[in-house]
Amino acid sequence: MPILYFMEINNEVAELCGVILGDGHLHNTENRITITGSIEDLDYYQNHIIPLFEKYFNIIPKLIKDKNKNSYRLVLQNKRVFNFFINEVGLIRGRKISIYIPRLIFEDITLLKPFIKGLFDTDGSLKFSKQKKEINYYPRIRFSLYRTPLSLELSYVFQKLDFNFGFCVDKRNGVLCYDISGSKNLDKWMNVVGSSNNVHITKYLIWKKFGYVPPKISLDQRQKLLKKKIL
């Protein structure tokens, strides 16, 4: 089966672009795409990312566990797939200092949403703080990114999607931080943008079910908690 090329990028391919620009790397000299995530991203890789590559490109990336790190890597080495993301989509190979949201995605709100979902699932976080209560009930979506054209474009994206957000620059390292906080924002995010990563989904479901999320619990622990009626 030949590699599929698209006259128009669809939602799932746009999501893959967000994944690649989040935790991915397009090799500078070889036709290799690498996506690296935490140990808890195994489920996300096996049940979502790998099936997407197989569905659209008829190829299964290699899944590698880093022996000395709590992480997994997806490695895909294929010239035709690599050239698709470079030549057809407009991603940039090498260091991610000049990355930007591909124009065909940036200018199409229907593609921008799944793209941001892919970026959130790989390079975003969802945390719950106590604020003035004794339980971790207050949600905060955060993107912490080094200064690139893409990280600067996120301000426009969040405005375009009509999210209230906070922005600051970490004086220690120059990292740009976007915070989308509060219950209404989180519900809206999951309805408008969504997530395909159970790392985020389980936190959201626990919060919806119990009103708060216990800190420092693993994906496996969260999945078990969701089967209980009370915490």
Image (cartoon, helix red, strand yellow):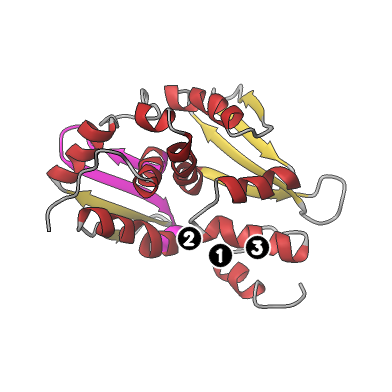
Horizontal relation, residue 48 to residue 64: left or right? right
Instruction: Please report whichever mark, 2 or 1, sits nearer to the chain's N-terminal start.
Output: 2
Q: CA distance from mark 3 to mark 2?
A: 17 Å
Residue 219's tag is 1
Q: State which quarter of the image contains the C terminus.
A: bottom right
Q: Is residue 39 in the magenta section?
A: yes
Q: Residues within 10 Å of mark 1 (few under 14, many from 20)?
A: some
Q: CA distance from mark 1 to mark 3?
A: 12 Å
Residue 40 image point, x, y percent: 48, 60
Circles 1 and 3 in contact, beta carbons < 8 Å? no
Find numbered disc 3 in the image and state the secondary structure of the residue it sits on. helix
| Residue on which the image places disc 3 | 205
Picture quarter containing residue 39?
bottom left
Circles 3 and 2 in contact, beta carbons < 8 Å? no
Residue 222 image point, x, y percent: 62, 67
| Residue on which the image places disc 2 | 40
At 17% from the left and 37% from the top, the residue drawn is 83
Decide: is 170 above or below 183: above
Task: Tell me the kind of residue under disc 2.
Answer: Glu
Instruction: Please report whichever mark, 3 or 2, sits nearer to the chain's N-terminal start.
Output: 2
Circles 2 and 1 in contact, beta carbons < 8 Å? yes
Task: Tell me the kind of residue under disc 3.
Answer: Leu
